[in-house]
């Protein structure tokens, strides 16, 4: 990858070195590879190319008041480089994505270094029963994600952001003063009240409930920007201008805004080809997501069986993943497959001689050795 730099970082005279825009220390790339579906063997013609790598910084950079970055990435996170320090940290925490970098197929490696070779020689340090648990846990988080995205597919959101007024209900004055029980709140639109012509005062001892006062053309409105404005109402105007009670479900509105933003972020950043089957009604789940869920589970099982994660998939396992991706299996069938692999993992874990987790002191010492070796080589 000589001469190719991560988007968003600047070039130095050494073609293998970069410096980040927000930190002056030089950083050298120790390793990079083609990761993701192209490494797993599950890529299709329209699959993205994911680049992952590791860079190193001088030890002195961590004494600077401006902290160096943990990672550098492009806008879509198709290209991501982790600092050596962050890499060791995540490996110690049994992160599946970082662990697979230590077991990349040779045809996916684009650049390596003496320090990376030392790290590979010590990679079994990061193999533990916690790694298998992390694979299983992450896989089931993806199942939950698939369910959430399936909801987005079947319940697309409008391009218009949620309005605060849609989360308002009122009890008009006439229903409170001499009105018939039980004084149920009604939607703002049905009430006929115009909040731009009113002021609001907080109702004591009641959350999200306000008194409304009609000020007509002189009103400044209940909402000003994103906030509900609470006014002090003159005692002489309490009875003459009182218009009713306002219930504003502020938390419901904020959640709706967040859901709307998340939906449209997903729409902007998603790979359109990936969603054609779902949006055409051929599938009711994210097939690619669940394919990678099963791959993660198979990788966790491989750790317990062979002492290393499964990166390049082949044979029957690869055919299973491809069949899931193309929609051969129903959602319930995929969950049954997942449950079967988890049961195998539990059995294997019970008789595994792997350590419970990574030796933190050994990982820390390795970080020091690798950094010192790089600094000595680059003097």
Image (spheres, rainbow, N blue to C red):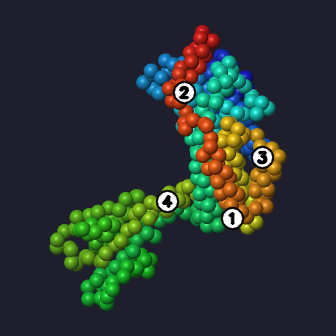
Query: Quick one: label 2 or label 4, which is nearer the N terminus?
Result: 4
Q: Which residue is mark 1?
A: 332
* Dot label at residue 28: none
Q: Are the residues flagged by discs 3 and 4 in contact, CB closer than 8 Å?
A: no
Residue where numbered disc 4 is placed: 257
- The residue singled out by tag 3 in the image is 42
Label 3 packing within 10 angstroms: few (<14), some (14-19), many (20+): many
Q: Which mark is residue 363?
A: 2
Residue 118 point in image, percent of width and height: 65, 21
Q: Residue at x 74, y 59 (%)?
A: 276
Q: Residue 46: image x %, image y %?
A: 78, 48
Is mark 3 in CB contact (under 8 Å) with mark 2?
no
Q: Is residue 102 above or below residue 286?
A: above
Residue neighbourhood size for the residue with mark 1, other residues' Cα within 10 Å, grouped as few (<14), some (14–19), many (≥20): few
Q: In the image, what residue occupies the spot 20% across and 73% down?
A: 237
On the question of residue 195 being in view, the answer is yes
What residue do we see at 33% from left, 80% from top? 172
Mark 1 and 2 residues: CB-CB less than 8 Å, in contact?
Answer: no
Query: Position of 181 compared to 284: left or right?
Result: left
């Amino acid at each position: 990858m000589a001469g190719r730099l991560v988007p968003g970082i600047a070039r130095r005279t050494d073609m293998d070195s970069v410096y980040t825009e927000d930190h002056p220390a030089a950083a050298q790339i120790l390793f990079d590879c083609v990761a993701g579906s192209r490494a797993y063997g599950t890529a299709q013609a329209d699959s993205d190319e994911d680049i992952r790598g590791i860079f190193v910084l001088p030890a002195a950079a961590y004494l600077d008041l401006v902290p160096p970055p943990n990672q550098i990435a492009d806008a879509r996170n198709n290209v991501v480089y982790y600092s050596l320090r962050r890499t060791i940290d995540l490996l110690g925490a049994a992160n599946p994505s970082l662990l697979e970098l230590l077991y990349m197929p040779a045809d996916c490696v684009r650049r390596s270094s003496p320090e990376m070779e030392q790290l590979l020689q010590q990679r079994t340090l990061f193999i533990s029963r916690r790694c298998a648990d992390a694979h299983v846990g992450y896989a089931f988080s993806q199942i939950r994600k698939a369910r959430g995205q399936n909801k987005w597919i079947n319940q697309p959101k409008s391009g218009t952001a949620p309005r605060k007024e849609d989360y308002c209900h009122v009890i008009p004055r006439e229903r409170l003063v001499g009105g018939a029980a039980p004084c149920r709140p009604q939607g703002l639109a049905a009430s006929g009240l115009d909040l731009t012509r009113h002021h609001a005062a907080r109702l004591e001892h009641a959350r999200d409930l306000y008194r409304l006062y009609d000020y007509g053309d002189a009103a400044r409105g209940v909402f000003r920007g994103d906030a509900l404005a609470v006014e002090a109402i003159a005692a002489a105007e309490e009875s003459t201008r009182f218009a009713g009670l306002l219930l504003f479900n502020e938390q419901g509105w904020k959640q709706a805004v967040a859901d709307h933003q998340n939906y449209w972020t997903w729409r902007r950043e998603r790979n359109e080809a990936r969603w054609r089957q779902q949006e055409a009604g051929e599938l009711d789940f994210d097939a690619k997501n669940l394919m990678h869920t099963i791959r993660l589970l198979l990788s966790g099982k491989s750790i317990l069986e062979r002492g290393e994660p499964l990166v390049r998939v082949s044979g029957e396992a690869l055919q299973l993943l491809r069949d899931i991706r193309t929609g051969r299996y129903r959602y319930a069938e995929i969950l049954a497959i997942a449950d079967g692999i988890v049961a195998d993992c539990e059995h294997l874990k019970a008789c595994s001689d792997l350590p419970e987790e990574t030796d933190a002191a050994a990982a820390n010492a390795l970080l020091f050795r690798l950094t010192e070796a790089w600094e000595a080589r680059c003097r």
